[in-house]
Image: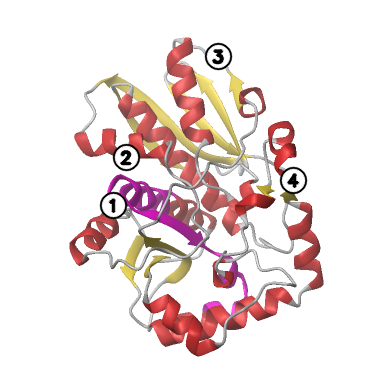
Amino acid sequence: MSTVEAPGWTPAETEVLVRSMMRAPSVHNTQPWLLEVTPGELSVRERSEPALPHHDPQGRDRAASCGAAVANLELAVRTLGRSCVVSFLPEHEQPDLVARIAVGEPAAPAIEELRCYGAIARRASHRAPFEGVAVPAAVVRRIVAAAGAPGVEARRVHEIAAVARLLHFAADTFRQDGAYQRELSLWTIRDEQAHRHGVGIPASRIPAGSVPWAGLVRRATDIPELPELERRLAGETLLLIMTADDSRLDHVRAGYAMERAWLAAVDLGLAAAVLTQPLHLPEVRSALCEDLRLTGFPQALLRIGYAAEADPPSPRRAVDEVLRRGP
């Protein structure tokens, strides 16, 4: 492990902060964040690049990715025994400033915080089918509770037929979208490139058994017939993350809540994967609101279930690409 220094923190503490934030999930593993460290304060900023104009035209996923990074960073601060207060989008004149974490006095972390922090290193996207074991209702309730955040609501999806129809439509649409396919190809890297670039999706992370309704749909992807898709979805547990409004603040908060739910799931022995791509199709998002009678804006679907084996982590940027040291 390399020595990393930042003002106000020991090298070991700085390593914990940076590595924890870097392990957050992000759209196509683009890791669109920067961390600024100054004495008593941590700032998470959104990188100006890379952009995904076809996968994330409004930047919702980038904002949510940064929100997930904030969730990890907050847990790292608490695990290091410091109190903290998170402020989202604190400066209107600095639109790239996603969050500021004011670090306070020493304070012992709660057991749940320690458990969720421990799940950060084990969290990875599970794109394959889950084992055929139902997730107990009590476990689902704990994961839903973990997603609780101001302006964000998580709920279990029971309307499987409606969701299957919409995901089937989305998968078929993306399979035929040439611009989408070209952009996906650009962000799919050979496994040996992962150590050089640190971003993108290694080809081995999209195995032949990947579920096509979970995004990353290619031209050659075999999309099951609707009845079969509905049957498969019925064997999974789906959670919907939605917000009261649809502003950038809501997108950041949704990512924060989604990551807290994901870490809770990992701590409880489950695997998960997030679906946002179908929601970038306006007709899918609108129909989901109508079919599920939602009172808010859907931001993400979280698949959870039991996996036969652990998923390998995706590559990560070098620390120096992420960390900015203040005075």
In screen coordinates, is 266 left or right of 2?
A: left
Decide whether the magenta segment is chiefly helix, strand or loop. helix
Whether 271 is among the magenta residues is yes
The range drawn in magenta is 256-285
Q: Residues within 10 Å of mark 4 (few under 14, many from 20)?
A: few
- The amino acid type found where label 4 is placed reads Arg
Disc on res. 4: 3
Q: Nearer the viewer, mark 4 or mark 2?
A: 4
Earlier-in-chain disc, 2 versus 3: 3
Q: Is residue 264 above or below residue 167?
A: above
State the residue position of label 2.
116
Q: Would you identify the image quadrant in which residue 78 lies?
A: top left
Earlier-in-chain disc, 1 versus 3: 3
Q: Would you identify the image quadrant in which residue 237 lies?
A: bottom left
SS of the residue under disc 4: loop
- The amino acid type found where label 1 is placed reads Ala
State the residue position of label 1.
146
Earlier-in-chain disc, 4 versus 3: 3
* Alpha carbon separation for disc pair 4 and 2: 31 Å
Earlier-in-chain disc, 4 versus 2: 2
Q: Is residue 178 above or below residue 52?
A: below
Q: Residues within 10 Å of mark 3 (few under 14, many from 20)?
A: some
